[in-house]
Image (tube, rainbow, N blue to C red):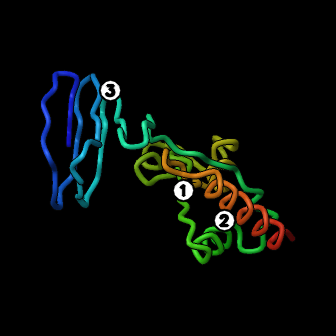
Amino acid sequence: MISTRTGSAAVISGAFSLTKIGGGTLELGGSATNTYTGNTTVNEGTLRLAKTGAQTNWHMFQVVLPWARLRGGRAAVMEAMRAANIGTGVHYPAVHLFSFYRSQGWREGMLPHAERIGRGILTLPLFPAMSDADVERVCTCLAATCRSLLS
C-alpha cells in the first residue's frame, strides 16, 4: 500500500521506478504486499517503511581506506567484500578529475585532499532493515580484509 498524509492509498506491483516529489511522507507498508523492481527516489520529504517503523534518508555510510598501503588498493577490498556477498560502492570520486572539469582547467594536484579521499573512499551497506548481526558481519569482513591486504 502507498499512503500519504492525505490518506490516498494503492497497491503497487510490477517493474517501474517509484519517485516521490514534494513534501510529506511516502509510506510503504500495510497488509498488502508491494513488489516492484526498479528505483525508488525521494526528492523531498520522507520515505518510511511502515512494516519496520524505520525512517531513513537513504544516505550512505563511507569509510576511507588506507588505499596506498593495501595490496591491490580499494579494488582488492571491494572484491573481497563481494566474495563475502557484501555489496560496496564508490561515492564519490574527486569530480574535478572528470573530463568535463578537466576541460574547464581543473588538474590533478589542485585539490589533493579530495583526490586522496576519492581514491580511498568505500561505501558500505546502510539500510533500515540491517540487523546488528548484519552490521557486525560487514565490519568484521572489512577489518579482516584490510588486515590481510596491508603491506
Q: Measure the C-alpha gap from mark 3 to mark 1.
A: 26 Å
**What residue sits right under mark 2 in the picture?**
74
> Which badge, 3 or 1, comes first in the chain's sequence?
3
Mark nearer the viewer, 3 or 1: 3
Q: Quadrant of residue 76?
A: bottom right
Task: Report the side of 141 relative to 69 (left or right).
Answer: left
Rendered location of residue 10, percent (x, y):
12, 42
Q: Amino acid at mark 1?
A: Val
Q: Residues within 10 Å of mark 1 (few under 14, many from 20)?
A: some
Numbered mark located on residue 45 in the image: 3
Q: Are marks 1 and 2 in contact (CB under 8 Å)?
A: yes
Q: Measure the C-alpha gap from mark 3 to mark 2.
A: 34 Å
> Which badge, 3 or 2, comes first in the chain's sequence?
3
* Residue found 54% across the figure and 51% down from its top: 130
Rendered location of residue 52, percent (x, y):
43, 42
Task: Report the side of 116 relative to 94 (left or right).
Answer: right
Q: Are marks 3 and 2 in contact (CB under 8 Å)?
A: no
Q: Quadrant of the N terminus?
A: top left
**What residue sits right under mark 1 in the picture?**
90
Q: Quadrant of the C terminus?
A: bottom right
* Residue found 45% across the figure and 37% down from its top: 54
Q: Amino acid at mark 2?
A: Arg
Q: Measure the C-alpha gap from mark 1 to mark 2.
A: 9 Å
> Which badge, 1 or 2, comes first in the chain's sequence?
2
* Foreground pick, 138 / 117: 138
Task: Report the side of 85 relative to 70 (left or right).
Answer: left
Label 3 SS? loop
